[in-house]
Image (cartoon, helix red, strand yellow):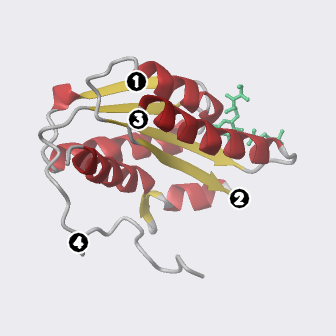
Amino acid sequence: MATQNKNLSDFSHMEVASASPYRFGIVVSQWNAEVTGPLLEGAFDALTTHGAHEHAIKIIQVPGSYELTSGADMLLRDTSLDAVICLGCVIQGETKHFDYICSAVAHGITHVALKHNKPVIFGVLTTDNLQQALDRAGGRHGNKGVEAAITAIQMAALSAT
Ligand SMILES: Nc1c(NC[C@H](O)[C@H](O)[C@H](O)CO)[nH]c(=O)[nH]c1=O
Ligand SMILES: CC(=O)[C@@H](O)COP(=O)(O)O
């Protein structure tokens, strides 16, 4: 398995740009808050560790991952933002609802990024069960929030070139 015993959030091999020049938005869903809370903490800490100022990080909450698209669009009304990070956790239930949400969010986030010509980062866990999600929200497989934040910094720096 690609992720077996791997920390997916290890960026020690990478040169990460300074986040200090940039302003970031974070939209986080309230569904599965025991997972999205640690994702938000990981993202916020990664941004500030790499130089982002706390007042340069605007955070909003939405009910569920399906609303992340709308939340990202709302954040990007603020044209001073350099990148938006979307954080959510979708866990498979008994029906196809999981498939529709995951697909809608992935496509919706891409649409918002192209609409505003700004990086919108997909920091959404899409797991079979809660344990897989916890493993990727500060557990044995790292923190998807950290990964999304690093990606946001790199894309903001790229956009500035
Ligand atoms: N089951 C999960 C949901 N469901 C809610 C949807 O995201 C949405 O809020 C609702 O369909 C109304 O539009 N959301 C998650 O983030 N995670 C889930 O596991
Ligand atoms: C991903 C979901 O919306 C899921 O929690 C809903 O569960 P179910 O498919 O059993 O209705």
Residue indicated by mark 1: 76
Q: Is mark 4 within 8 Å of ligand 1?
A: no
View quadrant of ligand 1: top right
Q: How many residues crowd around disc 3 within 10 Å: few (fewer than 14), some, or many (20 or more)? A: few
Q: How many residues crowd around disc 2 within 10 Å: few (fewer than 14), some, or many (20 or more)? A: few
Where 149 falls versus 2 (above or below)?
Answer: above
**Residue sitting at 41 percent across and 22 percent down?**
75
Residue indicated by mark 2: 128
- CA separation in Å, label 3 and label 4: 29 Å
- CA separation in Å, label 1 and label 2: 31 Å
N-terminal label among 3 and 4:
4
Callout 1 amino acid: Leu
Can you tell which mark lies on residue 117?
3
User: Circles 3 and 4: CB distance less than 8 Å?
Assistant: no
Can you tell which mark lies on residue 12?
4
Where 108 falls versus 46 (above or below)?
Answer: above
Front tag of 4 and 2: 4
- CA separation in Å, label 4 and label 1: 31 Å
Query: In the rendered view, does 147 fall on the left or right side of 1?
Result: left
Please identify the quarter of the rendering in which residue 83 is found: top left
Q: SS at mark 1?
A: loop
N-terminal label among 2 and 3:
3
N-terminal label among 1 and 2:
1
Callout 4 amino acid: Ser
The percent coordinates of residue 118 (x first, y second) are: 38, 36
Please identify the quarter of the rendering in which residue 25 is found: top left
Examine the rendering and report whether any part of residue 157 can be seen. Answer: yes
